[in-house]
Amino acid sequence: MLREISLFIIVSLACAISILPLLSMISTPIRHYGMIGPYLLRKDVSIFRGVVISKGSQVSISIKIEMEGYFHLRKSLQLTRAYLFVIPEEDYYKKMHTLETLFMNLSKEEILDFIKKISVHQTKVVKKGARAIEASTSAINLQTPLVLVLYLEGDLLPLVTSPYGFHCRYTIKPRLNTDWNQVLRALDVGIIGLVLFVIGDLRREDSWLRRLKRYTRGKKSHSP
Amino acid sequence: MPNKIITHSSYIISTLSKPLIIATVLLSLIQVIFLLLLLPNIVVYVGPTRPGPPTPRYPILAPVLGISGFLYGIIVISLAAQVGFELERGESSLYLSFPISRMSYILSWVVSSMAIPSLIFLLSLLIPLLILDPSMMLGISGVEVLLLLLQVLTTGFIVLLCSIIFRRRSIAFAVGLLEYLLLPWILLIVLSFLAYQIYRVSFPKESMIWWMAFLYPYNYFMIGQQVGVSWTKAVIANLPTLIFLVILVIVYTRFKFEVR
């Protein structure tokens, strides 16, 4: 029984190892849709709170983020500058409160600098048509939970007077990164499986290893 | 007695080894491939902004277990029905002429037809996780795995009971397939049809699917997700059923089981 189980361990390990190199090439997107209202709103600057991205494992993961947004407005939105910021969740909750209280008194540049300082990544938001915007980031290493924040600057009066929010779709493309620790762990499991297989096989009367030994001996004695 | 059980189950495994190894390797391949490919999506959480830690999401492993769980169920059903084949051909009387009790004989079948495939099923889930991140072995939805194990074991004991009562592999196998694959869905279709025709209510409602928890805790949990059923309810309903079946197998083996 030990022989069969250990053989199974070796087979499934071989299977897992053969797939590991492929993992960094494959990515299945996770989509999140939502209607969000502005977090902080002024006639000239507006900040939208996006989604939280976190991981439930210590495994190394990099993500690419794509954002597509649509404003439910009658008039076209005049944007001068727009960014999508990626902020660590901890910093977001610690520092955004300060921004919240000072928001009305700060200049556009000061607000932008404040968010830039606490963000780990930023990307320019591109206008797509009259009411739609989109942005996509390069690969970001997902270590701690991250919050996405959208910064809009321009003539935002239609947004202030509009009762509707902002319809947004986030596409997160996670990619698993393999490292040497995983290879070492696979090696450990392989050694344990092999030892169990040898023990299990030698305890059996119909040992495959003994049969192999007899076969190789027979081959050797027949060879000139 | 435990030594005899292990020796005989070892013998059963060796006689079944080729088909068993092929089937379990297939199961392992499917499970490992699906688990690894879906892992980034399983561990990454995307949700609305909130301060708390991510809450556990169910069903996480459903895409993986949907396929591997089906194969695992078929393996257990076919192995448990194999007892009927031995009884049918009279091989069991040969084994029982050796100093092995009827109870040890049946328990060795329980080990080789249910415990070993379950162990292999768990290993094929755990090995990829162990390689990638050992901490995930505890964190990744043990609930779904537990419910699937309970469901398959319940079916396994039903098939084993049919094997020793009817002494026919074909009957036991047919009962297993009917109970595991067809019956829950037939009943669901009938119930949803009746619910719509008579009461004009949308399906599922917990009052319509509660019966599933007794025999199909995993299916109950999966279908009841939309109406917020709890996994503990599924376990609490299924465990007495499973224990009752185990007792039934033991009592039948001790007092009624005969080998011809």
Image (cartoon, coloured by chain):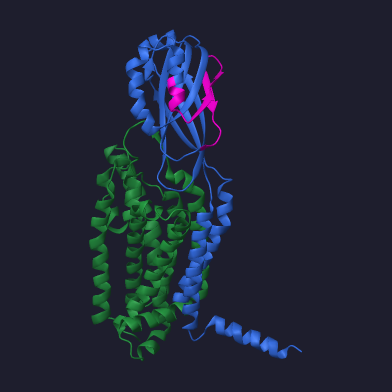
- Residue B257 is at least partly visible in this image: yes
Instruction: Name the one closer to the observer, A110 or A69.
Output: A110
Q: With A4 as the anchor, is A40 left or right in this view? A: left
Closest to the observer: B198 or A134?
A134
Residue at the right extreme, as displayed: A224
Q: Position of residue B168 (x, y in %)?
A: 39, 76
> Count of labels shown?
0
| Residue A11 within the segment the image draws in magenta | no
| Above-or-below relation of B114 to A82 | below
Give residue B126's quadrant in the image.
bottom left
Measured as percent of width and height from the top left, residue B195 is found at 30, 42
| Residue at image point 41% right, 21% down | A48
Q: Quadrant of the C terminus of chain A?
A: bottom right
Q: Is residue A51 left or right of residue B231?
A: right
Where is residue A71 shown, x and y percent of the image? 46, 17
Quadrant location of residue A167? top left
Residue drawn where x is 33% and y is 32% of the image:
B50
Q: Is residue A131 visible?
A: no
The magenta stretch spans which residues? Answer: A114-140
Rendering coords of residue B166 (x, y %): 34, 75
Q: Which chain is green?
A: B
Above-or-below relation of B196 to B72: above
**Is B158 situated above or below B70?**
below
User: Which color was chain A given?
Assistant: blue
Horizontal relation, residue B185 to residue B207: left or right: right
